[in-house]
Image: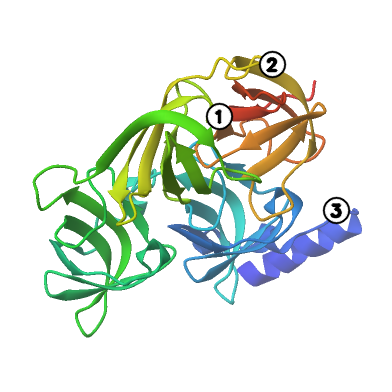
Amino acid sequence: MKSSLLKVAALVALMFGFSVGTAALVSDENETKFTGIIESLPNTVGFIGDWRVDGRTVHVTSATRIEQEDGPVAVGARVKVEGMTRADNSIDATEIEVKTGNDDGDDDDDDNDQPEFKGTIQSLPGTAGFIGDWIVGGRTIHVSSSTRIEAEDGPVAVGAFVEIEGTVRADGSMDATKIEVESNVNNDDGRDELKGTIESLPAGQGFVGDWRVSGRTVHVTPSTNLKQKHGAFVVGARVEVKGTMRADGSIDATRIEVKSASSGPGGEGQKVNLKGMIQGLPSSTGLIGAWTVDNRTVHVTASTKLKTEHGNFAVGVKVKVKGLQLADGSIVATKIQTKNSN
C-alpha cells in the first residue's frame, strides 16, 4: 500500500512539473548519524563530491550544510555526518560538522563506549608522526595517519604514560583512534624549552618546516600546537618553544607561542580586520593555505577559526577576516566568517 502511494505521489508530481528526488522518497528509517575521521576529500571548491569518512563514502552537494566553527575541513579532521543512507551504505549528507576532541554533540553519538587502555610506552616506530606499531604496557597499538595524538602534557617518548582509545582486534591489539600523553616518566612534561626571537621561517605557505629561533633550529610539523594570541609568527617576534631536543641541539617542537609581536616596518604584527569577497582559495585539498580576499593575501592555518553560519567558503562569498598583518601587507588569519550577501 505504501509503495502504491509513493508511486502515485511521484506520478502526480511529474504531471504538475515538479521534480521528485530520491531523497524525498526515502523513509525516515534511512536517516543516519555517525562521527568519524576524514580519510579523503574531493579536490573541488566547496568540497562538493565524494568524501571518505571512517571507511564510508559520503556524498556532498551544494545543499550540504558544512559547519567549521570548531576547525577546518581537512584530512584527519573529526566530523559528525548526518544524512540518508543509500542501498550501498553510502550517505547523502545533509549536514557535516567538524568536531574537536571527543565532542560529538549528541550523547548517543559519542565514542565514550570505545575501549580505553592506559599504559607506559615501551617502544615506538622510527617514522614521521610515529605511524606504525607501538608497544604500550605489553600491548601492540596500531597507529595510523588518522590517529589523534595529544601531547599537551608531554612528548611522545618511551617511558611516557598514555591513555589510548580505539578498537580492539581479535588478537588483542588495538587500532588507536586517539592517544593522549598523561605524564612523563620524570613526573613532569618532559619537554625542553626555548625562549627567543624568530630569525627565519620556512619558505612557502604555512609554517611547517625548519625555523631559526635565537640561533637554534626548530622543527615544526602539522601536529605542532601554534599559538598566535599575542602576535603573528614573523621574523623578529619573540616566542616560547616547547619540544624535545635532538642530539644535534635542534628541537622537535610540540608547541610554539608568540610572547610579543615584532615591531617591524609596515605595521607588522598589528591586528587588522578585513571585509571583502573571496577571490581565490588554495588549490590543494582543504582550506589551509593562501586565500585572496579583496585583493589581499590571507594565510589560513590549522589554528584559524572558520565560521560558516551564512554559507560555505567559496569564491565569490563575502567574508570578514580578523588577523595579524605581516610586513608584506598579507594577513595571518585568526578568524574568518562568512557574511550575508545582502
| Element type where label 2 sits in the image | loop
Q: Nearer the viewer, mark 1 or mark 3?
A: 1
Say which label, 2 or 1, has the lower sequence index.
1
Which image quadrant: the N terminus? Answer: bottom right
Which element type, helix, strand or loop, lies under badge 3?
Answer: loop
Drawn side of residue 123 relative to residue 236, left or right? left
Q: Where is residue 183? Give x, y as percent.
A: 15, 48
In the rendered image of this protein, does residue 197 appear above or below residue 77? above
Disc 2 residue crowd, few under 14, some 14–19, many 20+, Cα 10 Å: few
Identified by mark 1, the residue type is Val
Is residue 1 visible in the rendered structure shown here?
no
Question: Would residue 122 be found to the left or right of residue 296 on screen?
Answer: left
- Residue visible at 13% across and 42% down in the picture: 188
The residue indicated by pointer 2 is 266
Judging by the rendered image, the residue that carries numbered circle 3 is 18
Q: Are marks 2 and 1 in contact (CB under 8 Å)?
A: no
Indicate which disc residue 235 carries.
Answer: 1
Q: Position of residue 19 (x, y in %)?
A: 83, 56
Q: Nearer the viewer, residue 201 or 49?
A: 201
Amino acid, disc 2 = Gly
Q: Quadrant of the C terminus?
A: top right
Residues at badges 1 and 3 in contact (C-beta under 8 Å)?
no
